[in-house]
Amino acid sequence: MTARTSDVAILGAGLIGRSAALACARRGRTVTLFDTREPGESSPAGAGMLAPAMEGDGSPSEKLLIAGRDLWPSYVAELAALSPVSVHLSRDGILALAHDPDEAGRQRHPAHGRPRWRSSAELSALEPGLRAPDGGVLHELDGAVDNVALIAALDFALAAEPRVGRVGAAVGVERDGQHVRVLGRDGSMHLVRFAVVAAGAWAPKLTGLPRPLPVEPVRGEMLGFPVAATRHCIYGNGAYVVARPGGRTIVGATMERVGFDPSTTARARQDLHAAVAAFLPQLANVEPDAHWAGLRPVSPDGLPILGPDPRWPAIIHATGHSRNGILLTPMTAAAVASWASDERPAFDFSPFRPDRFE
Ligand code: GLY
């Protein structure tokens, strides 16, 4: 069989794969995007929270998550020039409710816009429906993006991009001299200079990789309510809340190690509903009209696995984003495009090297 050729193969078409494909194409690379549809994909399932203050656990994730967050305004503006699909970006801040004032101190970080302790009364002024007797912190620079609209916007831009070809799933890679041979599930073969591993929780299933990838699926169950309950994103005890355009409220999320099982459970529905109703009482008597789950690709340290593989630098890893795949989409896309152009990104990605677990 004759192999098809392009500069870059992207193995996986979630948000990381799609955005990396577009970024590579805009740097002049020809791209084959291998699109695997799996039940439980994390990209459409997430709530789109951009929350370095809540999801970072100190250095080195802190710098990465903040830099990733700060790329969003220009990323959405650039995408708007390529697609008519509007992508809502909220930078109204994230409210982190505390159980006592000490907790607010632990959440402070200068790069988060000097978050300040807010009393219960101040929080009520910001969010009239909120019950937060112990106060909390407003992380002013954090927010959320509509990840579902983002997928649609990227699909439009990719379809209009002549350098990108979209094909079915890849099963793995093989060495072929200076090239990588990517094997399609349909029996096709593709010769490329670089292959980008962007298959999320499914990345360890790809054959021929230079190392086993310690990424496991961790299920997050989510609820959707058909009402507008808040303006801000809110992290409360046992649940977080994101306001979606069009008068909807998204509530997440569980952390369940159940393998590749994307089903939902009555237990999670009950627990999430009770947790959110404790701080947004108006939701107590509203039934969720949607309940779904996504499988996060979680690495042992919760940090992404990024960069060319030291054993085979033509393989570029872009997986293991754990709880921050949406937040890190523009950052990862730009870095992949640099690596696939034989350039070193300006940001120091060495803490996220693929060989750090050896
Ligand atoms: N970033 C939130 C979550 O993974 O649930």
Image (cartoon, grey):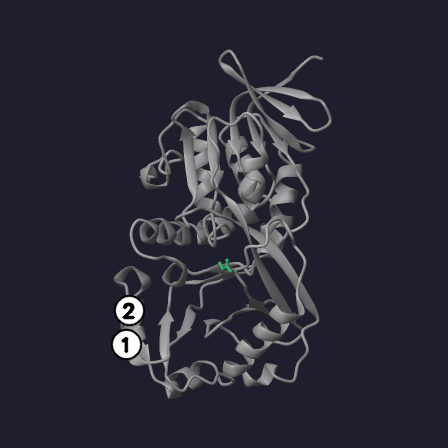
Q: Name the residue carrying label 1.
A: 102
Residue closest to the eye, 235 or 244:
235
* Image x and y of residue 272, in percent: 57, 72
Dot 1 and dot 2 residues touching (CB under 8 Å): yes
Q: Is residue 79 above or below residue 344?
A: below
Q: Is 162 on the left or on the right of 57, as rendered?
A: right
- Which amino acid, by three-letter code, is at mark 2? Arg
Measure the C-alpha gap from mark 1 to mark 2.
Answer: 7 Å
The label number, if any, that marks residue 284 in the structure image: none
The secondary element bearing badge 2 is classed as helix
Q: Who's the residue at 44% across and 68% down the image?
A: 92
Q: Is mark 2 within 8 Å of ligand 1?
A: no
Q: Who's the residue at 57% across and 32% down the image?
A: 10
* Image x and y of residue 226, in percent: 67, 74
Q: Residue furthest right?
A: 186
The label number, if any, that marks residue 106 in the structure image: 2
Residue closest to the eye, 91 or 292:
292
Q: Is mark 1 within 8 Å of ligand 1?
A: no
Residue closest to the eye, 163 or 242:
242
* Image x and y of residue 209, in percent: 51, 27
- Which amino acid, by three-letter code, is at mark 1? Asp
Q: Who's the residue at 56% across and 81% down the image?
A: 277
